[in-house]
Amino acid sequence: MKWWYGMMVFLLWNMTYFNVEAQKKNKKNKAAIEVGSKAEQPVLKDTTQMIEQPIIQGPQIQFEKETHDFGKIVQGDIVRYQFKFKNTGNKDLVISDVKASCGCTVTQFPKHPIKPQEEATIDVSFNSAAKMGPQNKTLTVFTNAEPSIKVLYIKSEVISPSAPTYLQQKSSNY
């Protein structure tokens, strides 16, 4: 019985001692966190500023607009448009190719790397010869950005040169 009593006293003393030590340690940690949190506040502000910047690293292509509507054009007209874009990333942007969905559409694009924050254009010309009615064409742009493929759209309505609105249409385009 004395043995059991001695063991109980020993266990109670250990539990009390370790509980007091744990409380001291918690107070030290809490004080360190409070002191550390004051020192870390500027780091949190920097982290907030980092969130405002682009999260994705590398080249990024951002177009001013991705669809252009030529409206009504007369059959046989060749119309042109420049898709303006900017490299909003932090590394050089390279356009490896631009594929048109139709042989009636010709593109020209920069062959040199586009530096970060630099602007450039992809030139497009659409030949409406042998076309009639609504036209919807795509331009697939292949880059080293993420995503690596971007699709641009051009559309128009090709009307006959003998249509009654031909003179009105022709004068309003020029």
Image (cartoon, rainbow, N blue to C red):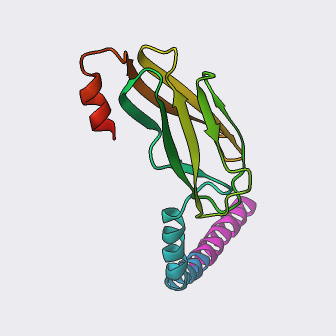
Q: Is residue 58 visible?
A: yes
Q: Position of residue 149 (x, y in %)?
A: 64, 36
Q: Position of residue 112 (x, y in %)?
A: 74, 55
Magenta range is: 1-23
Q: Is residue 68 left or right of residue 120?
A: left
Q: Please, is residue 157 above or below residue 49 in the view? A: above
Q: Please, is residue 151 above or below residue 76 in the view? A: below
How many numbered marks are there?
Answer: 0
Q: Kindly indicate the quadrant of the structure image that contains residue 73.
A: top left
Query: Which quarter of the rendered picture does the N terminus lie within?
Result: bottom right
Name which residue lies at 33% across and 37% down.
173
Name which residue lies at 39% across and 33% down.
69
Q: Kindly indicate the quadrant of the structure image that contains residue 107.
A: top right
Q: Position of residue 81 (x, y in %)?
A: 49, 41
Q: Is residue 104 left or right of residue 77?
A: right
Residue 103 in magenta stretch: no
Give the camera-side residue of 141 and 3.
Answer: 141
Give the camera-side residue of 26 and 33.
Answer: 33
Q: Is residue 37 visible?
A: no
What secondary structure is the stretch in magenta mostly built from? helix
